[in-house]
Amino acid sequence: MERQGVREVEVPPVDLNDQEPQAVVESGEHQQNENHEEEASAAAASANYQLPGPFSSLESSIEILKKKAQELIENINESRQKDHALMTNFRDNLKMKVSDLTEKLEERMYQVYSNHSKIIQERLQEFTQKMTKISLLEMELKQVCQTVETVYKDLCVQSEVPTLEEQMVNADCYKKLPS
């Protein structure tokens, strides 16, 4: 039957009470083909199957929508739980890896510190030995300076004291001077 360019399709009536709720796929999504078939048969059933009263098809459509909305909410909640479990597992694995890496880094740092400590200890020992040697050389230098000073003083004193020859020459000079 055709009315002003719109065709009416006759669909056999379907009993809504006999339908089972759609199973949820593991990924949390409905299979699209089954959804379209159910929606088409539900729409056809609501159009042809009429309960007593003027709002019977509207009430059945509302019930179908409520059921589908509830299924979607349950699917979303399941998906959220799976996501939460995945994130918790990821966080735990990441914590373990970071902890292991931190331990390895700490061990490596202690090895480097130990090697540097040995090198520093060796150099400090060399420094101490060289400072001791410098102190000994400084003492020797002071002794040499004192010896040189003593020799210089002795030389200066001897040059002031006339030698025996100088004394005789000087004595002869005094005798020859007119008085």
Image: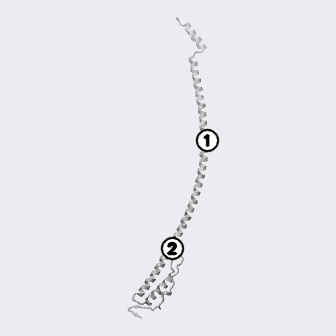
Tag shown at residue 126: 1
- Side (left or right) of 77 relative to 146: left
**Residue 33 x/y as whole percent:** 51, 83
Tag shown at residue 85: none
Q: Give whichever of 126, 114 is nearer the camera.
A: 114
- State which quadrant residue 164 falls in: top right
- State which quadrant residue 171 falls in: top right
Vertical relation: 73 (above or below) 104: below
Q: Residue at x 42, y 85 (%)?
A: 59
**Residue 174 x/y as whole percent:** 55, 8
Q: Which residue is mark 2?
A: 79
Q: Mark 1 belongs to which amino acid?
A: Glu
**Residue 122 x/y as whole percent:** 61, 44
Closer to the eye: label 2 or 1: 2
Q: How is the image coloured?
A: one colour
Q: How many marks?
A: 2
Q: Residue furthest left?
A: 4
